[in-house]
Image: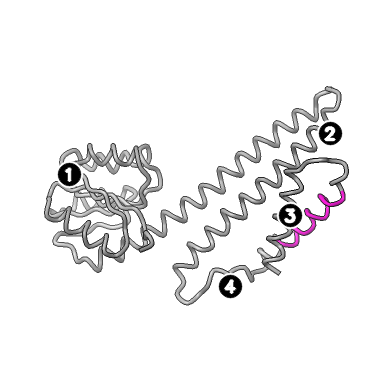
């Protein structure tokens, strides 16, 4: 069975902990279990999860300390709170924290599963956007370094910089396309009956394809000036991407 998502369940009530994990595993989710906030914090630091299902009154989380630290421990991981002792105070506190749902025990599993599915999708979108943002940051830093090289008076610096610029550019184009494809597939999962490939028929992505075609043309014209096996391979990969989309 394909893994639907990775979930950490933190609860000192053993029956709820194990039964919920078993039910979610049957739905295709990978689940780890811990009995308190201390174990949850360690697991979140050492592993990648999409969702944390946490009890409010378990040891170490009586005042929602674990949830307050989530941004530092595992940024972007979605949180679902469960409690057998609901109160207006805890409900208000959860609203002010990054919590996707506040459920009262005994929880209805179908309701919990619905929240889990939404939370997993949200986290995957977050990861895709975060990855694209990081790639753009690396690209910006690389371009800044090339800009500094172009300002230098070193012999041959311009030619080396242009070669580096082309290599950096196409590495990031290919990476960004991969990130974009993943993001589109995650978004498509939320739209019943819509295949991911249908989403490529939008004006913005056609514009992107046109830009890639133009870029390939520029690289083709300059290939004799830059003898780089890696750039040639990138050009071929880009040509394949365009061929697959047209």
- Residue where numbered disc 4 is placed: 198
Start-end of magenta stretch: 209-221
Q: Give the CA separation, mark 1 to mark 3.
A: 52 Å
Which of the pair 93/115 is nearer the observer?
115
110 shown above or below 72: below
In the rendered image, residue 23, in percent from the top left (x then y), is placed at 22, 62
Q: Residue furthest bottom?
A: 193
* Of the image marks 2 and 4, the number of the one nearer the N terminus: 2
Estimate the spatial distance between the alpha carbons at disc 1 and disc 2, rounded to whole Å.
60 Å
Of the 4 image quadrants, the one containing the N terminus is bottom left
With 98 as the anchor, is 193 left or right in this view? right
Return the residue at label 2.
159
Instruction: State the residue position of label 3.
Output: 236
Viewer-nearest of labels 4 and 3?
3
The kind of secondary structure element at disc 1 is loop
SS category of the residue bearing label 4: helix
């Amino acid at each position: 069975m394909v893994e639907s998502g990775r979930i950490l369940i933190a609860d000192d009530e053993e029956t709820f902990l194990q039964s919920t994990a078993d039910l979610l595993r049957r739905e295709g989710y990978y689940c780890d279990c811990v009995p308190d906030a201390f174990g949850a914090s360690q697991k979140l630091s050492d592993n990648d999860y999409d969702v944390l299902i946490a009890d409010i009154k378990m040891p170490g989380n009586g005042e929602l300390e674990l949830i307050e630290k989530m941004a530092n421990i595992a940024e972007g991981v979605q949180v679902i709170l469960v409690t057998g002792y609901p109160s207006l105070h805890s409900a208000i506190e959860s609203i002010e924290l990054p919590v996707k749902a506040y459920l009262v025990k005994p929880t209805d599993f179908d309701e919990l599963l619905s929240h889990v599915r939404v939370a997993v999708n949200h986290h995957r979108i977050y990861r895709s956007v975060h990855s694209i943002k990081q790639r753009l940051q690396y690209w910006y830093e690389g371009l800044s370094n090339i800009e500094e090289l172009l300002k230098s008076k070193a012999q041959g610096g311009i030619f080396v910089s242009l070669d580096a610029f082309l290599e950096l550019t196409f590495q990031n184009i290919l990476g960004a396309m991969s990130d974009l494809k993943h993001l589109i597939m995650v978004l498509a999962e939320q739209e019943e009956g819509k295949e991911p490939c249908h989403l490529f028929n939008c004006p913005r992505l056609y514009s992107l394809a046109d830009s890639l075609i133009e870029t390939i043309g520029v690289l083709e014209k300059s290939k004799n000036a830059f003898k780089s096996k890696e750039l040639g391979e990138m050009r071929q990969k880009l040509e394949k991407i365009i061929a697959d989309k047209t």
